[in-house]
Amino acid sequence: MQTLLVEFGMGTSLRRGDYTQAAKRAVQDALWHNSINLAELFGFDKEDMRITLDVGVQHPEKVDRDALKAVFPYGHVTVNVAQGGLDVPRPEGEGNPTIMANVALCVGFDMERADD
């Protein structure tokens, strides 16, 4: 795969302690930064896109990878979740922390393709 675009995003779950929601918001943040039509520029279908999503949160096991894949309307998505992000304790010391998730979203294509 030839990577053609990298975007970064940050998302939060302020009160619910939801790592997946924070990660989804980070993905949306990264997606909203970009409006480049890469597929058309290189003569590919949008379904040909190869998307690698790297997510950082304090508790990677609490992220629903399928929910993150569902954010993308097309393409082949690979989700990697690792230790990262930040959990910020509530000022009053009770309840769920504010969760911050960070993502790096890489988009590319298999540039060597067989013509029909």
Image: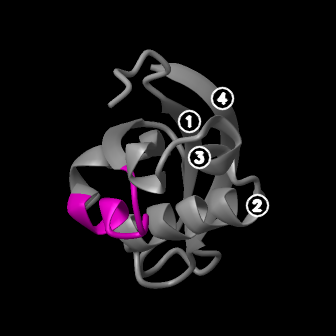
Do residues under tags 1 and 4 come within 8 Å of each other at their CB atoms?
A: no
In which quadrant of the rendered image does the N terminus lie? Answer: top left
Q: Nearer the viewer, mark 1 or mark 3?
A: 3
Residue type beneath disc 2: Ser
Q: Which residue lies under the disc numbered 1?
A: 106
Secondary structure category for the residue under label 2: loop
Between 98 and 105, the one nearer to me in the picture: 105
Q: Which residue lies under the disc numbered 2?
A: 35
- Looking at the rendering, the stretch of residues picked out in magenta corresponds to 66-75
**3D distance between C-alphas at marks 2 and 3:** 12 Å
**Magenta span contains residue 58:** no
Q: Which residue lies under the disc numbered 3?
A: 39
**3D distance between C-alphas at marks 1 and 3:** 14 Å
Along the polypeptide, which appears first: circle 1 or circle 2?
A: 2
Secondary structure category for the residue under label 1: strand
**Magenta span contains residue 67:** yes
